[in-house]
Amino acid sequence: MNSIESTVSAWSGVEVDSHDRGGGREFTLDGREIGHIHRGKLVDIPFTRRIRDILLEEKLAEMHHVMSDSGWVSYHIQSDEDVDGALWLLRVAYLYHVVTLQNHEEETSTGDMIDIDAALAELDMSASLEDVFNEVRAA
């Protein structure tokens, strides 16, 4: 959990606080939750249903352990190797929020500090996920 928290908290604009439902740590960007981690073993991340469906189809995440009828996904950390998968999912959520904030022209400097094209390229996403980001960026 410490490596996840230290990595995510270093992303521009991210704040970390206690998660009030089930304990753990919560990551927010401009007041919007990008995910939380329970006891270092379970990461829950909110996405749109479309993104959730792609992640489930590509077996990159699991249906949320409680709210299966939502866009939320869960990711279990069972070994050190799983940390990279959790960070990848959190980064996708983070960048989605950055792009969304930029599109709504809300007062935020976060997007100005990130090269979105380079950040997205680093994720090496599937064509399906790239399509979602391209559509959101074009909106």
Image (tube, rainbow, N blue to C red):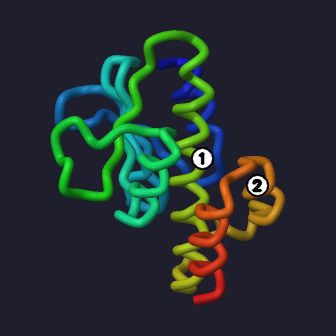
* Residue of label 1: 91
What residue appears at the point 40 percent right and 57 percent down from the top-left corner?
A: 53
**Amino acid on which disc 1 is placed:** Arg
Question: Which circle's residue, 2 or 1, is located before the other in the chain?
Answer: 1
Mark 1 residue element = helix
**Amino acid on which disc 2 is placed:** Ala
- Front-lying residue, 82 or 11: 82
Give residue 106's position: percent from left, percent from top: 52, 81
Q: Is residue 32 left or right of residue 14?
A: left
- Front-lying residue, 9 or 66: 66
The quarter of the image holding the C terminus is bottom right
Mark 2 residue element = helix
* Residue of label 2: 119
What is the CA distance from the residue labelled 2 to the residue labelled 1?
9 Å
Q: Is residue 56 left or right of residue 91?
A: left
Determine crowd level at label 1: few under 14, some 14-19, many 20+ residues with C-alpha closer than 10 A: many
Quadrant position of residue 78: top left
- Front-lying residue, 56 or 30: 56
Quadrant position of residue 19: top left
